[in-house]
Structure formats: structure tokens, C-alpha cells
Image (cartoon, rainbow, N blue to C red):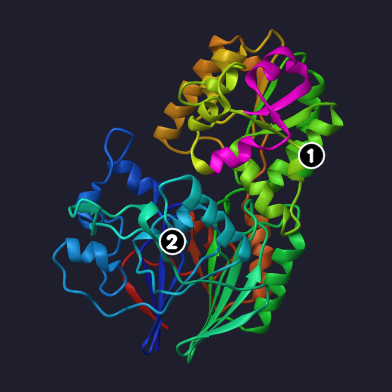
Amino acid sequence: MTKLTFFGGLNEVGGNKILVEDKKTKIFLDFGLSFGLSGKYFADFIQPKKGNALEDYFELGLLPKLTGIYRQDYLKHMGITPEERGVDAVLLSHAHLDHIGLLNFLREDIPVFCSEETKRIMGIFDLTSSCEFCKATPTFKYYINTKGEKSRWTKEKGQTNRDVRVVKNGETREVGNMKITAFSVDHSLPGAMGYVVETSDKTIAYTGDIRFHGRHPELSNNFAEKATGFEPDVLLCEGTRVNETENKTEDWVEKECCKVANDTKGLLMVNYPARDLSRILTMFNSSGDCGRRLVVDFKQALLLQLMNELGYGPKLKDVLVYAQPKSWYLINHDDAPPNQVEYDYVKWERDVLRLDNLVKTKDVKVNQSDYMLFCSDFSIGNLVEIKPVEGSRFIRSMCEPFDDEMTIDRERIDNWYDHFGIGKDRRRQIHCSGHANGIDLKKMIEVIKPKAVIPIHTKHPDKFRKFVRTTMIPAEKKEYTF
């Protein structure tokens, strides 16, 4: 019999960790971080203790306490006897942290299925942050150094490759006694996928995160049409915006941003989800229509470089890359020795520094009306050197704050813009969501015709009952047999 257990993703947006079992085969649908639960206990000033391995996560309910799924180096450090592998695969819908954020704790030999885009984005995380999704650095391990003494193992000493397996749209793979078919869907991150899982007696469809109003609705429509042919017993359906009826589109965002740009005499600063290639393309189109150049940061330059190879735009050569000053700020000193300028940056950033389309702080400062500058919350301090002139504006192209911590962060950022004379009347919220609204979800469910619907990734699961009579609202960590 097929069993489902939800270790996250219920009554919250994200945190998906759904265990599917049939006979001796077990797979997880996503393995994401719950931002809400994590935010209850952790912030900048208090973080999980790495030396405590998994204990903090177990104690606070951030990770399910299951055997056979976690890294052996962590278990050994906790005094736990090595375990046989207890999960056969993880299916990743896409590379947002609320779907992949806890993957680094899993055993490296558990096969992870995902799109090529998802694999590349996880690789960027690995390269540019402390995350380890495609690779793993042995932890709590020593080696004998040249002095004959023990030293701690580091990333530079060597890493283990995680068993990441790329699946293509419409491709079917076998895992144990289950069949898994992957389908591309449209979302605010490239490479998003939904899945159909066939067990020995049931069929489960999983939307992942999905929308029908983005640049590629045909992908999501194809998923719905193809899922129908499987006659699913259960549809695990995301419902982030199930209580909403309105849809803004990328085309609308593009036109509204262009209106703001045409009304801006100084620098136009924009903030949007950094890995949302649809939004980057939107900003690129908008900036070009208004006679400005889009200026991205180093990480977006790396993203474009890798995704251009897969046919995603805009082309890296067609945007500008802001040479953000770091450490000693030597990039802003023309007389600084080149080798010392590079010393301010880590290796992957040095490769970006060699691009021909860099702009420096002085370029932006002197010619502010020429640019649409990506300005994230993390880079807002650059405004001290740039000093936006009178007539500058800011566009925020992200979701509105949905918890207290995000509201506080938003107020802090607003204080920065107020300081530089970019008051509330000079700031605009222009955004469209990466999630389907209630009307589109209803239409999708009517096409798929599942025998039962389980709402996930939503704070409003009860809303599904208005248009799906067979809606089932499960409890977390409880096993359900179908």
C-alpha cells in the first residue's frame, strides 16, 4: 500500500518535505527549509551550531528524525552507529531554498533527481556560498599535514559529489518499484518541475510550485494535460495564492517599470529575486525600451553565463556587471596594483572581474541616468559611494513582506532610501507572482481530475474545499495510507 507522510509544507508557504512509501521503496518530494519555523528560533545573532551536527535541527523540529537518510559524518560526530540507506531518492521541483534548503544534510549517496537548470543553480550556490547541494565537504574529519600533525578537512582539500541525476521534460525513471515521470512547469525560477509518481497501487501527481501567467504557460498546461492521462489518485497541489483571483504578468511588470524609468531623471534602482531569469529578462527589456542599461551583480553574471548555454536570456554580453567594491575597496582606486585588486575577491569573483562589460562605482555615480541598477538588500550600502542624485527612484519587484521579520527588514531598507532622498513617493512596488491564483488552480484541477486533492505550500488549505469536494487536509508527521 502507498503511504504519504508530510514533514513540511502544510499550513505554510514552503518547507516541502513529503515522504512517499510503497513496499520497500521510499522517496522524498523536495527537502526544503521551513522559513517560518526556522525564523521562530534563528536569526542573524543566533544560528544552529554546526558542532552539534543535527541535534539543533531535530530538537526544534526543522528536520525529521528518521534513520538512514542523513550524512554519515554528522551521525558519527553525534555518536550514532552508521546506518543503511533508508531513502531511495529525492525529487526536487526547483532550486528555491524552501524546496532544497536542507538537502545538504542528506546522505550523498541518495539519488537526487532534478532538471539541468536546477542542478546548475545548486552548483552556483555551492560555488558562491557556504551551501553544499551538489557537493559535500567531509565534516569533523582530520588529515595529517606536512608537519605530521592533524588538521581539519576543508573544502579545498576535497569534496564528495552528490548523486545528482538530471531528468528531462516527459522523461520516466524507475526508482525501486516506483515509476517517476518529470514535467517542466512555469515558475519564477528556471527549470521548475512537477512529477507524477506511480507506485504499485496508486498514482500521485505533484505540482511543485506552478503558475499559468508567466512567460511559459504552455509548460504548466502541458503538465496538467499529461497528468490527466495518468488518472492520479492524489494531486499534491501548491496553493500559495489560492485565496487570490488577480494575475499580474511579466508583460505588465515590464511596461510599468518602463513608465517609472521614463519618469526618472537620476539613477533607477531595482530589486528583484536574484535568480528569477524571467524577471531579469523583464528588467533587461524594460531598461532597453527606456534607453538605460541593466546593471547586474556578480552572482547574476555567473547565472546568466551558465543559463545562456541553455538558451535563457538576456545574454551576459548585453548587460553590464557592477564591480562591487569589497574588502579594501581597491577596485575604486586606479593606482592599486592589479594583483591586490583581485585579492579583495574570492576565486570565482576574480573570473567575473575579467569580463569586458564591468562598470565601476565612479561610472554609475557620474552617469546615473544611463543605468537601471540592481540593488539588493545586501548591496544597498553601495549607495554611500554612488550618492543617488535628485530625481532618482527605486522599484521593488518582489513579494510584499509576509511575516514580522520581513516587515522589519523592509522598514530598514526604506530608511536607507529615505536617507538618500528617495521617499515613499519615489518608490514603487511592481511585481507579479511565481504562483498560480485560485482561479487557475481550479482550472488545472478540473483538467487533471484527481480522485483527491491535498493542498500544500499554502496558509489557506481550507479554500480548496470551495471548488474541490474531495479535498483532504492532512496533519504533519502523520502517516496516511491510500
**In whole angstroms, how far apart are the C-alphas of marks 1 and 2?**
32 Å
State the mark number for residue 135.
2
As drawn, the label of residue 175 is none
Identify the element where label 2 is drawn.
strand
Q: Counting other residues with Cα less than 10 Å from the Cα at mark 1, is it few (<14), some (14-19), or many (20 or more)?
A: few
Queried whether the magenta region covers residue 370, the answer comes back as yes
User: Which image quadrant for residue 429?
Assistant: top right
Q: Which residues are magenta?
A: 348-374
Tell me which amino acid carries mark 1: Asp
Residue 247 appears in the picture as rendered = no
Quadrant of the snapshot with the C terminus: bottom left
Residue furthest front in the image: 147
Q: Quadrant of residue 193?
A: bottom right
| Residue drawn at the location 46% of the way across and 53% of the way down | 98
Question: What residue do we see at 74% from left, 53% from top?
Answer: 312
Question: Which comes before the other along the chain, label 1 or label 2?
Answer: 2
Residue for badge 1: 318
Query: In the picture shown, does residue 198 fall above or below 17?
Result: below
Tell me if mark 2 has few (under 14), some (14-19) or many (20+) residues whose alpha carbon lies within 10 angstroms of its own.
many
Residue at 75% over, 15% down: 367
> x, y (%) of residue 387?
61, 11
Q: Position of residue 236 (x, y in %)?
A: 52, 69
Residue type pointed to by label 2: Lys
* Residue 289 screen position, x and y as percent: 86, 32
